[in-house]
Amino acid sequence: MAVESIPRQSVVDVLEARLRDDILRGEHQPGTLLPPERELAAGYGVTRTTLKHALTRLEQAGLLSTRHGIGTRVIDFLRLGGAELLPMLASQDSSWLKEVFEARRHIGTLIAGRAAARRTVKQSRRLQELLEAVAEAPDADATQLADVEVHRELARATGNRVYLLLTNTLFNAYLPVRLALQAPFEDPAKAAGRLAPVVQAVVEGRVEGAQSAAEKYLRGTEKLMLGSLGPGRSRSGGKSTGSG
């Protein structure tokens, strides 16, 4: 049986996670400067070199901004941040994950209707092929990833590339923690059966039918995926955190 290896964390990894958690919890308030590096490193019990590496990662993630001669400032990510923060936020706090799924449901329903109105014959064939790939997937992870490709094709069928980018953004937000969200995909045939009414309505050009089917599908899978987390389980791999 294949077993997923346990990643080994470096001191930088651990410090990055602690700093990130402290920022998201409000220990370091948005808009404020972090303490001087020497003081901050001593407070976390690490070297300044380790601290610099962790701060660089968090700056790249969009949580910090460093200006020479001024210091490192905590970014007000709710005002200035973008969708690139969602994977990190969703992996830390299940309340973010719930909001991602709510947005997924609303946008996915809209996309299904637009796809039904605009799909081409080629796109209809492709959707049916991708649905078959869901049914024939070898395991839950492959089933979930095959399901993602169906939704990407639905977004393409709208003819609006922004919908495709929004779809990618929402999937990127929760795919890093997908191992804890596989409940709807454990049986590939059933997963395909749940998705089939959406594909069929789009192929047949039934706009309202596609929207109704998508709403039902997305709401149902959302309930199954969030339900599989259980109380307080919000991090990758389903570890309990006490948040959410």
Image (cartoon, rainbow, N blue to C red):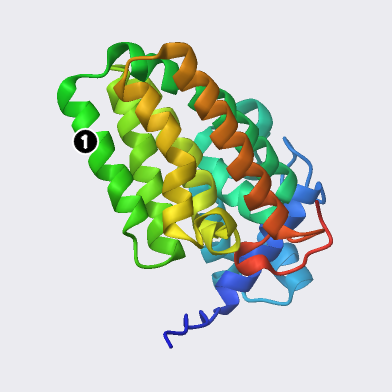
The N terminus, quarter of image: bottom left
Image coordinates for residue 27, horizontal then vertical, percent: 82, 51
Image coordinates for residue 243, horizontal then vertical, percent: 81, 56
Q: Can residue 69 be seen here?
A: no
Q: Which one is nearer the viewer's eye here, 216 or 57?
A: 216
Image coordinates for residue 86, horizontal then vertical, percent: 57, 42
Q: Is residue 103 left or right of residue 21?
A: left
Tell me: residue 236, above or below residue 99.
below
According to the picture, the residue beneath numbered tag 1 turns out to be 126
Q: Can residue 197 be seen here?
A: yes
* Residue lying furthest bottom: 1
Q: Is residue 14 left or right of residue 194?
A: right
Tell me: residue 44, above or below residue 1.
above
**What residue appears at the point 47 percent right and 50 percent down from the top-left corner?**
191
At mark 1, the secondary structure is helix
Image coordinates for residue 18, horizontal then vertical, percent: 70, 64
Question: Residue 112 sits in which quadrant?
Answer: top left
**What residue appears at the point 68 percent right and 58 percent down from the top-left corner?**
228
Total tally of numbered discs in the picture: 1
Question: Residue 153 sits in which quadrant?
Answer: top left
The amino acid type, in three-letter code, at marker 1 is: Arg
Q: Is residue 147 left or right of residue 72?
A: left
Tell me: residue 15, above or below residue 231.
below
* Residue lying furthest left: 122
**What residue appears at the point 74 percent right and 44 percent down from the top-left corner?**
95
Q: Which one is nearer the viewer's eye here, 243 or 71?
A: 243
